[in-house]
Image (cartoon, grey):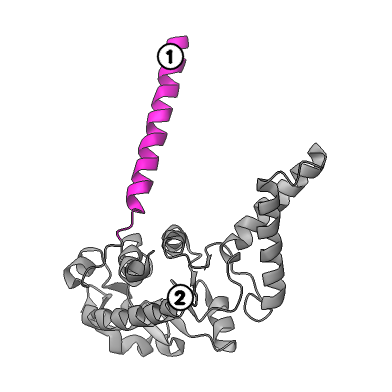
Amino acid sequence: MNNAKETSVGEDVKKESEKNNILEERYRMDFSVAPISLEKMLKNGVHFGHNKSCRDPRMNRFIFGTKRSINIIDLQKTEEKLKEAIEIIKGITAEKKQVLFVGTKKQAKAIIKICAQACEMPHVTERWLGGTFTNFGVIRKRAQYLKDSQEQMAIGGFDKYTKLEKLKKFEELEKLEKKMGGLKEMKTLPAAIFIADIKTDEIALKEAMNAKIPVIAIVDTNVNPNNINYPIPANDDAVSSIKTIMEYLVGPIVK
């Protein structure tokens, strides 16, 4: 009986380890600066848009054609716009300013977080907090409170509290970290915002437009690219596509 239990536990551990290895490999990023490759983008499905019935006609200039009812993105246009976006981001970082990276959809959040952390930029990968730009003063105070509290906790500043008080503090900080942990180092409004999916994070786009913050974004065939300062036509659903675009986009500025 014990042997059966041990075997079962061993198999569970093995499965969990294999699952973690698959996830690690899926989100392994290559930030080596290399020329943009149309072949690599093709291999990773960057060119696959949505069904032609979902096409936004304002994306026509970025569409090469249609195959089996699927819109095919013109990868030469993707390359052109990607290079433009890269230069914008390089210019911002050269001036010691920030780009806020936003990606809250399931396929994008891990990639966006890894990339933002790699180039030491703020990020939002959970729910966008309404007022992040339009009511930035309040957001900034909460983010600073989170940062200060975490620093106090690290040096034993919470030791004066009872166990119950400590627990409540830990729970509060845990919730705040999930909500705005990526904003702790954003002391002013960013010089630009990058959005992985402008449909999913429509509120972020609207706030950026209202605050006149330049927007860099992936635009798939089902969206309106006209409100985006620096659109990058690409598949915004496939992990492989998002990952490829992000590797090219932030590779030159990774510290």
Q: Crowding at label 2, few (<14), some or many (≥20) Cα neighbours within 10 Å?
A: many
Towards the viewer: 252 or 78: 252
- Tell me the residue at 62%/56% (across/down): 177
Marking on residue 32: none
Query: In this rendering, would 88 be left or right of 181?
Result: left
Towards the viewer: 152 or 225: 152
Give the labeled residue for mark 1: 4
| Position of 171 relative to 67 (above/below) | above
Q: Quadrant of the C terminus?
A: bottom left
Give the labeled residue for mark 2: 194
Q: Crowding at label 1, few (<14), some or many (≥20) Cα neighbours within 10 Å?
A: few
Q: CA distance from mark 2 to mark 1?
A: 52 Å
- Of the image marks 2 and 1, the number of the one nearer the N terminus: 1
Towards the viewer: 65 or 134: 134
| Residue placed furthest toward the top | 1
| Residue placed furthest toward the left | 39
Find out whether residue 13 is within the magenta segment.
yes
Span of residues in magenta: 1-30
Q: Amino acid at mark 2?
A: Phe
Q: Main secondary structure of the magenta part?
A: helix
Towards the viewer: 235 or 182: 182
Please identify the quarter of the rendering in which residue 59 is found.
Answer: bottom left
Find out whether residue 123 is within the magenta segment.
no
Q: Amino acid at mark 1?
A: Ala
- Tell me the residue at 72%/52% (across/down): 172
Residue 254 seen anywhere in this rendered image of the structure: yes
Helix, strand or loop at disc 2? strand
| Position of 178 relative to 241 (above/below) | above
**Could you say where residue 158 lies in the image, as x and y percent from the top left?**
75, 45
Q: Which of pointers 2 and 1 indicates the residue nearer the eye?
A: 2
Residue 221 seen anywhere in this rendered image of the structure: no
Helix, strand or loop at disc 1? helix
